[in-house]
């Protein structure tokens, strides 16, 4: 894997970001989804909050981040812009846009839009989010030429593919400028939305290889009492990737 960057926020600040957050967007211990620090996103009004990393354009990018709604207060049908991959110059057009929405009937939703050269959505998809930490992985491939129409988008929620789009015309969108990846880029916040949610463990590569879940303390354990645990995803209904410590012997 050719890793572009890994932000685990364990420095306790915005080290590695091209532009870090300020005000109500902070690195905090309470926001840690793994380790000791994470990104604390505090919505108190409609003010946009953002932090980004500048990236040199390439043929593809794959990135993963963790998101925890943390019982964020949202009114029925409230929605806001959450995180984006955009051009790093020119018109700063969106390449991949993501939103968070809420309805009383369905709860939280994560929405994703993979853009094309005519400002349309080649990928237009969503999935329901439980009020718990999740990891989201997104893959964007540029068309090989202005008329090639062979670009591609795909995304995963907790390791399960949720949707894809092929034959995408996105060459100019992805190749006219370098890029900016915003793990947080809040916009369009409704009056009924307030509270704190968390983002953590942002990683990106430019070879398209799977990033997957953040390693748990059990990542190197292959057996328990002589029984292989290959393929085991939960212990006592707790996802292995969410276990931070083990007490006693196993």
Image (tube, rainbow, N blue to C red):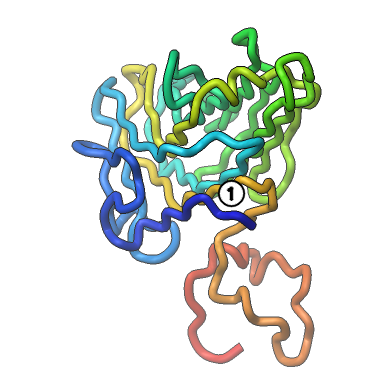
Q: Please say whether residue 29 is visible from this viewpoint.
A: yes
**Residue occupying the point 59% across, 29% down:** 106
Q: Is residue 27 above or below residue 103?
A: below
Q: Which of 88 and 195 lies nearest the eye of the viewer?
A: 88
Q: Is residue 112 left or right of residue 72?
A: right
**Residue occupying the point 44% across, 27% down:** 88
Q: Is residue 139 above or below residue 189?
A: below
Q: Please say whether residue 238 is visible from this viewpoint.
A: no
The quarter of the image holding the C terminus is: bottom right
Mark 1 surroundings within 10 Å by alpha-carbon count, few (fewer than 14), some (14 through 19), many (20 or more):
many
Quarter location, residue 235: bottom right
Q: Is residue 195 left or right of residue 83?
A: left
Q: Which of 80 and 11 lies nearest the eye of the viewer?
A: 11
Q: Position of residue 107 (x, y in %)?
A: 54, 31
Q: Position of residue 20 (x, y in %)?
A: 29, 41
Q: Is residue 133 above or below residue 78?
A: below
Q: Is residue 24 left or right of residue 211?
A: left
Quarter location, residue 136: top right
Residue at the farthest top position: 118
**Residue occupying the point 49% across, 30% down:** 178
Q: Is residue 45 above or below residue 61?
A: above
**Residue occupying the point 62% across, 67% down:** 240
The quarter of the image holding the N terminus is: bottom right
Q: Position of residue 227 (x, y in %)?
A: 78, 86
Instruction: Please give the count of numbered marks on the rendered protein.
Output: 1
Q: Position of residue 33 (x, y in %)?
A: 43, 57
**Element under disc 1:** strand
Q: Which of 246 and 98 lies nearest the eye of the viewer?
A: 98
- Residue to which mark 1 is pinned: 205
């Amino acid at each position: 894997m050719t890793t572009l960057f890994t932000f685990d926020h364990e420095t306790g600040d915005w080290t590695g970001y091209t532009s870090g957050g300020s005000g109500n967007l902070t690195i905090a211990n309470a926001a840690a989804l793994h380790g000791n620090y994470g990104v604390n996103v505090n919505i108190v009004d409609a003010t946009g909050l953002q932090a980004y990393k500048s990236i040199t354009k390439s043929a593809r990018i794959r990135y993963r981040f963790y998101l925890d709604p943390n019982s964020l207060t949202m009114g029925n049908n409230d929605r806001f812009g959450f995180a984006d991959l955009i051009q790093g110059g020119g018109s700063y057009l969106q390449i991949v846009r993501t939103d968070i929405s809420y309805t009383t009937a369905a709860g939280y939703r994560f929405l994703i839009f993979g853009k094309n050269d005519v400002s349309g959505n080649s990928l237009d998809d969503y999935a329901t989010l439980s009020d718990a930490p999740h990891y989201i992985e997104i893959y964007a491939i540029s068309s090989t030429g202005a008329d090639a129409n062979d670009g591609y988008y795909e995304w995963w929620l907790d390791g399960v593919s949720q949707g894809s789009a092929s034959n995408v015309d996105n060459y100019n969108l992805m190749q006219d400028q370098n890029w900016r990846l915003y793990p947080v880029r809040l916009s369009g916040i409704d009056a009924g939305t307030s509270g704190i949610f968390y983002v953590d463990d942002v990683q990106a590569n430019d070879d398209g290889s799977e990033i997957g879940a953040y390693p748990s303390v059990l990542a190197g354990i292959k057996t328990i009492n002589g029984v292989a645990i290959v393929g085991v995803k939960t212990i006592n209904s707790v996802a292995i990737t969410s276990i931070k410590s083990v007490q006693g012997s196993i």
